[in-house]
Image: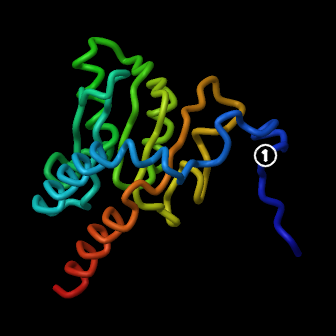
């Protein structure tokens, strides 16, 4: 028996999105510098014993207005994901929950919670590094950000410095298995 998977053109997703599938081309090159900042945040999380995921939020001019890294272990906060922490900092910097014109740059494809928060915050763009086949919600396992039932759908640029972002996670989990 074949399982039907919703896709472009079905009732959930509607007609093909004008933003199209995640971009993995040269457009991602412009986000390598901010991704390196996100990687530095991810390393801070790893050093603190949390899963090494980092994020930065850029305003419309490309300036960093929010940074964050996973902080669930230290804070005992299940919402302490890098993206949430960075978007909270950006909202505080702007004095508004609306992050119109902003770009979220994160080392790992956002989960459903973080993808939903990006939609709710009205970010213009989500840029991510490593694909998350187990919990990714920006195109791999789910595609929350392009669901036609939602009122906002950010552009997605995928796999910016994916190898470096993925290696950081692989090394972290390999080290935990050895213990």
List the residue tagged with mark 1: 8
* Numbered label tally: 1
Q: Quadrant of the N terminus?
A: bottom right
The residue most toward the front is 26
Colouring convention used in this rendered image of the protein:
rainbow
How many C-alpha atoms fall within 10 Å of the one at disc 1: few (<14), some, or many (≥20)? Answer: some
In the displayed structure, 163 sits above or below 20; it is below
Q: Residue at x 40, y 32 (%)?
A: 103
Q: Residue at x 70, y 33 (%)?
A: 18
Q: Is residue 76 visible?
A: yes
The residue most toward the left is 47
Residue 22: give x, y in percent of width and height.
58, 48
- Where, by quadrant of the figure, is residue 96 drawn? top left
Residue 113: give x, y in percent of width and height.
45, 43
Q: Closer to the camera, 142 or 153?
A: 153
Left or right position of 146 against 79: right
């Amino acid at each position: 028996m074949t399982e039907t998977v919703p896709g472009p053109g079905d009732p959930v997703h509607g007609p093909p999105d004008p933003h199209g599938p995640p971009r993995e081309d040269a457009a991602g090159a412009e986000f390598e510098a901010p991704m390196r900042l996100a990687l530095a945040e991810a390393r801070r999380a790893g050093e603190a014993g949390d899963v090494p995921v980092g994020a930065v939020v850029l305003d419309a001019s490309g300036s960093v207005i929010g940074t964050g890294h996973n902080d669930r272990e230290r804070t005992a906060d299940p919402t302490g994901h890098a993206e949430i922490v960075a978007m909270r900092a950006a909202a505080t910097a702007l004095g508004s929950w609306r992050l119109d014109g902003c770009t979220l740059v994160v080392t790992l494809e956002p989960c459903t919670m973080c993808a939903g928060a990006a939609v709710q915050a009205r970010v213009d763009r989500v840029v991510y590094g490593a694909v998350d086949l187990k919990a990714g919600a920006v195109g791999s396992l789910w595609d929350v950000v392009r669901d036609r039932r939602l009122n906002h759908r950010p552009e997605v640029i995928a796999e910016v410095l994916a190898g470096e972002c993925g290696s950081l996670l692989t090394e972290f989990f390999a080290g935990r298995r050895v213990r």
